[in-house]
Image (cartoon, helix red, strand yellow):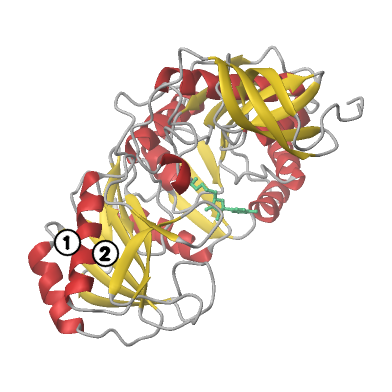
Amino acid sequence: MPKIKPPVRPGQKITLTISGQSHTGDGVGKYKGFTIFVPMAVAGEQVEAKVTQVKKTYAHARLKQLVEVSPERVDVPCPVFQRCGGCQIQHISYSAQLESKRQQVMDAFARIGGLDHVKVHPVLGMKDPWNYRNKAQVPFGGSNGQIQAGFYAVGSHEIVEFDHCMIQQPENDRVLQQVKELVNELAIPPYDEKQHRGVLRHVMVRTGVHTGEMMVVLVTKGPHLPQKKRLVKEMRERVSGLVSLIQNIQPKRTNVVLGKENRILWGEPVIHDKIGHVLFSISPHSFFQINPEQTEVLYDQVRKMANLTGEETVIDAYCGIGTIGLYLAKDAARVLGVESISQAVEDARNNARLNGIKNSFFEAGLAETVMSRWAGEGVQPDVIIVDPPRKGCATQLLDAVVKMAPQRLVYVSCNPATLARDAAYLKERDYEIRNVQPVDMFPHTSHVECCALVERK
Ligand code: SAH
């Protein structure tokens, strides 16, 4: 990219047209050919903005005035939208959110040489894009006997209170309020982060949306939980659907919410939820998809792309608790899963057992290492599915894919940029990306998820 000297300086007022949204949801436009990010600006708008920060190849600016307003700009329904930071694009109509996510995927392919022809389908969104999250996690704090529960304000650890999150399952909100009331009544001391004193640090609530089962996790600084007996009794009476009440102990000074140790205060160690026909058990530490409704939509796309007949050997790489592999197991001869977190692999095996699935095998390890070994041992999968974290697949893994030479690769991606990079690498090695189907897993946030079909030429 040719370098140009930044035509702006901090404090300068500029007028520019916004051409799209960035991967963090900011408006993006050019000023004298130089890229400017303007938070809260919407594609198509003309804005006046004040430059706040100048870097070598781009600058940030604060929105001052809307000169021309996009018809896609909507009134934000959530009262804490900008302070919370959980959502980034509530101010954009849902249909425009979906279009902008599709555009981001197309842009990623356009930037990578030779892939601008790739067909990107319209994003599969939700009919009702609210109340979708099945997990809530809120910090507790406060002083002088007044307990606060809410979220950390953007970029700080100041707790902002709220009683309703628009993207959360209403059940989770209700239970959080009940826990807060109870904690106040019983005067259970909240944790004081600065002093590293007190008791209650976080409360996590998880709902199995298909089973109605609910888990409440009280994260405490130490093992001591005052009023434990009353707390358990009251929680059982007040919280309908409660199946699992857990104390988790996090003694460290850290931002990591959960500590290692779980103690069952009452009920079961896990709750259950379903994705399609498969039942999953979920423990406090389990990774489980946040939006179960859209997860099914995504996995159905994966199934379509995998195009299984029942004869195939399928590899599920970066398998987590085995969700994709177990979802497809009945359509395949066998499924081999690999995942780096050994607890997740245990969960995957348990989930297979829970569903009577006998043709799945899970191995703990780095996907790139394990798959290289499988390639060396002559494992011959017909279909490989990968679902890597944001940084995409390791080159070693892509080389193992090429060596095993499956007919199809289904690539599930939460980052279009690394998807495009990996697709370009595979294109040089006889694999052609056919089409990309984005699925909106996180409405009102800037996250973009898609799956792509890559076939051997
Ligand atoms: N497919 C699962 C999980 C996807 S999240 C689902 O749909 O629910 C990505 C997973 O990759 C995480 O579980 C993470 O622990 C795992 N992971 C990250 N790097 C890895 C690596 N190098 N090898 C294997 N697994 C890895």
Residue picked out by circle 1? 242
Label 2 Cα crowd, 10 Å radius (few <14 / some 14-19 / many 20+)? many
Kindly state the secondary structure of the residue where label 1 is placed: strand
Q: Quadrant of the C terminus?
A: top right
In this rendering, is residue 210 above or below 233?
above
Give x and y (percent) for residue 89: 48, 31
422, 96: nearer the viewer:
96
What separation in Å lies between label 1 and label 2 (alpha carbons)? 8 Å
Say whether residue 147 is left or right of residue 254.
left
Give x and y (percent) for residue 35: 76, 26
Say whether residue 151 is left or right of residue 210.
right
Label 1 Cα crowd, 10 Å radius (few <14 / some 14-19 / many 20+)? many
Work out whether residue 142 can be spotted.
Answer: yes
1 and 2 marks in contact (CB < 8 Å): yes
Res. 38 image quadrant: top right
Q: Earlier in the sequence, mark 1 or mark 2?
A: 2
Residue appearing at x 27%, y 44% in the figure: 169
Kindly state the secondary structure of the residue where label 2 is placed: strand
Give x and y (percent) for residue 312: 50, 34
> How many callouts does the rendering have?
2
In this rendering, is residue 154 above or below 429?
below
377, 102: nearer the viewer:
102
Res. 412 image quadrant: top right
- The amino acid type of the residue labelled 1 equals Leu
326, 73: nearer the viewer:
73
Residue appearing at x 27%, y 49% in the figure: 273
